[in-house]
Image (cartoon, grey):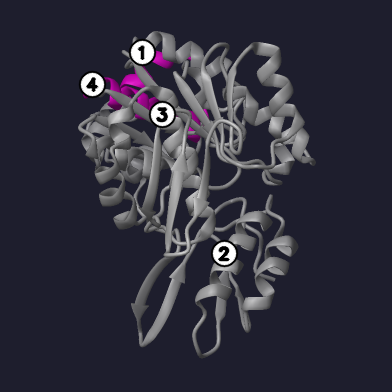
Amino acid sequence: MLPAGSPLSDWLTWLETLSPKEIDLGLDRVQSVLERLSIEIPANVLLIAGTNGKGSSVAMTEALLRAAGYRVGAYTSPHIIHYNERIVVDGVAASDEQIIAAFEHISASRHDVPLTYFEYGTLAAMAVFSTQKLDVWVLEVGMGGRLDASNAIEPTASLITNVTLDHCDWLGNDVETIAFEKAGVMRPGMPTVFGSRAVPNAVLRHAEAIAAELLLLGRDFDFALGADCDWSFAGRHVKRPSLELPGLQGEFQVQNAAGVLALIEASGLTRALDAALLRQVLPDLTLAGRWQAVRAAGADWLLDVAHNPAAAKGLSETLAATRGVGKTWAITGLLDDKDVEGVVAELNPEVDYWIAVTASSPRATPQA
């Protein structure tokens, strides 16, 4: 444990030394420490898993619930600039002091249990949230689901946005194997929304095996794009026609929004589905790193976190639909577990020039 008064930067540096593995999937370590922390868990815990769209779905869920008057804690990863972005209480990033206090509590309670950087951070988010008298926790799964640290507590409802190839070194080399890992967020008798029309058999089989309530796009809820730049949502009980498109760009964000509305309906937090509220909140929503437009140095820059072929395809389609005059340069850095060739192949039709960079990570793919 670090000396009292150590800054957050020292804690984060120290956390990186704790485990020889940056990623070490498993729940036993987290659950054992979680029991010692005596964390109070709220009546509503929403767990959001999937290959792509998790961060956007967390942002939409949090914004709608907060606008409806619920007090919400949202946990996401990774961060864009500051670590504090990962732990947000009622729309405000946790302070250094709050995070340090949580780290100290964990350090004093874990004894000799080894934790990874991500596990420490996940427990810290729960520790911060438990002191804030929140109505809802919204937790983004880091990787997979079955063995992810965020899955150490029981969700009251969950969302799996979609399943495509990513993190294959840890989750498996085919969609069905990866889908089984993500299906681990399901619980017997609890609702899980699957947000894509392409449903892997592993998800269907696991839901049946444990008697989870699985809500499917096209069967239990649906959405449709209108002719006037609008869209509609139809849930089991809630129908919302003539909605403005989400502020997050890309047709895939409408599908993400539909999954979020289905999750909120299944959770019983339905005052967040008020028609006026939906029309107010979703069109104004922005998220750093998701089709984020920046004007600097006399050029238009677009920042996006697409990091696998499926996400790159969505980015490419949006680029094609919005591209103006001039050349498009792509500055790209990826981690070594990513399908670099697959990402480049999807974006290449919309990119005129490429600049490869090495990301600031031990797992970065070298630029040359």
Amino acid type, residue under disc 3 in the picture: Glu
Marks 3 and 1, the one that precedes in the sequence: 1
Marks 2 and 4, the one that precedes in the sequence: 4
- Which label is found at residue 315? 2
Residues in magenta, as a range: 103-132
- At x 61% / y 38%, what residue is drawn? 218
- At x 69% / y 50%, what residue is drawn? 337
Whether 191 is drawn above or below 173: the answer is above
- Residue 121 visible in rendering: no
Q: Is residue 314 left or right of residue 89?
A: right
* 4 vs 3, front mark: 3
- Residue 283 visible in rendering: yes
Q: Which residue bears the numbered disc 3? A: 265
Q: Which residue bears the numbered disc 1? A: 37
Marks 3 and 2, the one that precedes in the sequence: 3
Residue 39 part of the magenta-drawn span: no
Q: Which residue bears the numbered disc 4? A: 131
Picture quarter with the N terminus: top left
* 4 vs 1, front mark: 4
- Seen from the viewer's position, the closer of residues 65 and 105 is 65
Q: Are marks 3 and 2 in contact (CB under 8 Å)?
A: no
Name the secondary structure under disc 2: helix
Residue 109, horizontal then vertical, whole percent: 38, 14
Circle 2 packing at 10 Å, graded few (<14), some (14-19), many (20+), is many
Q: CA distance from mark 3 to mark 1?
A: 32 Å
